[in-house]
Amino acid sequence: MTAATPHVRSGRLRTALVVGGGAVALLVSVAVAMTLGPTDVSLVNVRDIVLNHLGLADIPVRAAANAIVWEDRLPRALVAAACGAGLGLCGVVMQALLRNPLADPFILGVSSGASTGAVLVAVLGLGAGTLGLSAGAFVGALVAFALVLLLARAASAGTSGVILAGVAGTHFFSAVTSLVVFAFADSDATRGVMFWLLGSLEGMRWNHVVLAAVVVALGSVLIGASAQTLDAFAFGDDVAASLGIHVGRVRLLLFVLTALMTATLVSVAGAIGFVGLVLPHAARLLVGPRHARVIPATIVLGALFMVWVDAASRTAFAPSPLPVGVGTALVGVPVFVALLVRRKAARS
């Protein structure tokens, strides 16, 4: 067995520092986020409440503080972390499969389809009360993804066909959403729907935490196991095929996995943009292009990013929260521009 080169050892060390340091920063960030809000809660209170619920202590705490931290702020922060990690991870997969640095999880039409499904349930009452907003969004996301796949298959133009089909599907479902809201929604329904469409983590509970965490954990394991496959796809279909990869089958499976993860997260938290676009680039800038390093770095950075964006979104205009999707766009656009400028400077 040959010894690792200094360059490989340096990359591994840098990845370990980014992932390890990011994980510590994430734990601290979640704890600090618990203290932010109209009601003051100290870090000591947060520690005591968490230890009490984990069965590791029995420390007297105020009932109000306990409810605020355990039933409201902690589930919200954990869902934010799961959404950031999951959407960032889906962005890594899409950019590798499509060989397009501007690809993100929503390029498959999942977000616009979820919006249409949510609007049909909220405004038209589709499902006769058997479907909630999240269930409608999930069904709509899957329908949109199926349509995009059918269009891409009909186009038979490889990755460019997928991108074009995704653009067509996105605009179609966005138009349907706008039509339903314009023609059938009253002012109250319009306001509620638009708040969800912009991404909202209001009202997160522990069942949302479990759903998002399980989906992201399973997706992380499966995508992490495909790191070398994603490396091959990044060099093109011919290279992947020469390495014994069944290009069509593997790409379809990864598309389906990405769509299911994105659909689930969007059904929980609404459409949160720019996370899947920006965070993979930030991870590559820190740890290099190999997916075995990019994947864990993106998971940690995405979770950290979303925790802080959500904390800022719910406190900047308190008591009225800012939709978290607006926050990710306000932060994500300047960060993405800075990454592009730095990337160009590094190449020149």
Image (cartoon, rainbow, N blue to C red):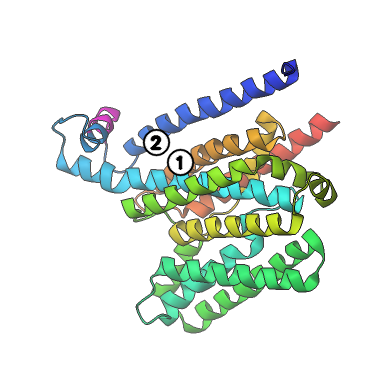
Residue picked out by circle 2: 30
Residue sitting nearer the eye, 317 or 113: 113
**Mark 2 vs 1: CB contact within 8 A:** yes
Q: Earlier in the sequence, mark 2 or mark 1?
A: 2
Under circle 2, the secondary element is: helix
Q: What whole-number distance in Å separates the C-alpha atoms at marks 2 and 1?
A: 7 Å
Direction left: furthest residue: 60
> In this picture, is 210 found above or below 185?
above
Give the main secondary structure, helix, strand or loop, of the magenta stretch: helix
Q: From which residue to which does the magenta span run?
A: 41-48
Q: Amino acid at mark 2?
A: Val
Q: Is residue 270 left or right of residue 343?
A: left
Q: Quadrant of residue 157?
A: bottom right
Under circle 1, the secondary element is: helix
Residue picked out by circle 1: 307
Name the spot of residue 183 as percent of width and height, x first.
51, 84
> In this picture, is 121 found above or below 24?
below
Name the spot of residue 323 as percent of width and height, x first.
46, 55
Q: Badge 1: how crowded within 10 Å, few (<14), some, or many (20+)?
A: many
Q: Is residue 43 left or right of residue 79?
A: left
Q: Quadrant of residue 164?
A: bottom right
Total labels drawn = 2
Q: Residue at x 54, y 44 (%)?
A: 220
Q: Quadrant of the N terminus?
A: top right
Q: Amino acid at mark 1?
A: Val
